Image (cartoon, rainbow, N blue to C red):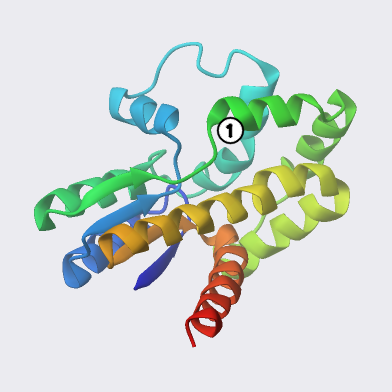
Amino acid sequence: MIILKGVIHGSQRSSREVFELIQRISPKAVGIELCQERLEALLRGPKEGFYSSFTHYFLSKIQELIIERLGGVVGEEFISALRASEEVGARVFPIDLPLYYLLGRLKEVPLREKVSLILELVPRRMELDRDGINQMLYRIRRRSPSIYSIIIEERDEFMARQLMRLEKEYDSVVGVVGIGHLPGISKILKERLRNAEEKDN
């Protein structure tokens, strides 16, 4: 059983909902939308110079566009997941693509394209709900399909595979992912699990 929980990064409400869900379900494993490097950075706290390169800055900026309007804390929803998992005895696993891979892929995108995308997103206001996030993702996809593929589609595929691997080993799994990843991961899981069921018949 895989239960997906979509969150708005930095949202205090999402943090509460994640904590309550894990406590209620009491899964054996929890997968969170972080890689090992970012999980360790979250546990250490803010580190000076972490966004020293433009690519690091670019990766963080889209998330900050949401968080700065919420008054939340970066990674708050994942900290809640860690605390709830500890209380129920669930193991926590980072399920996202490694940071070095994402940085390498984004370096392949022309600088002008990255700057253009940030300049489009920064001045815009948006509602901090599912529709607002979807509108932002639509603008990213329209402005830069290559960046959208890297930061959304490739990660959706990887995280879905990781969750299926955890389900095989632990049976009950909660996946905590950004709300923008929810449709893609859900679609992949439904297709793969349906195919698996057909093969078992």
Instruction: Compare residues 65 and 154 and report the one nearer the observer.
Output: 154
Q: Residue at left 38%, top 25%?
A: 41
- Relative side of 118 to 187, left or right: right
Whether residue 174 is visible here, answered yes or no, is no
**Few, some or many residues within 10 Å of mark 1 (<14, 14–19, 20+):** few
**Residue 84 falls in image quadrant:** bottom left
Whether residue 34 is visible here, answered yes or no, is yes
- Relative side of 16 to 124, left or right: left
- Residue 132's x, y, as percent? 64, 63
Instruction: Decide: is 185 above or below 199.
Output: above
Q: Residue at left 77%, top 50%?
A: 140
- Relative side of 37 to 91, left or right: right
Instruction: Decide: is 103 above or below 86.
Output: above
Which amino acid lies under the numbered mark 1 shown in the image of this protein?
Answer: Ser
- Residue 66's x, y, as percent? 56, 48
Q: What is the count of numbered marks?
A: 1
Pointer 1 residue: 60
Q: Judging from the image, what secondary structure is the residue with disc 1 in?
A: helix
- Residue 62's x, y, as percent? 63, 41
Tell me the quadrant of the picture where the N terminus can be found: bottom left
Q: Residue at left 51%, top 52%?
A: 159
- Residue 197's x, y, as percent? 49, 82
Instruction: Compare residues 126 and 137 and report the one nearer the observer.
Output: 137
Q: Residue at left 46%, top 52%?
A: 162
Q: Residue furthest bottom?
A: 201
- Relative side of 163 to 154, left or right: left
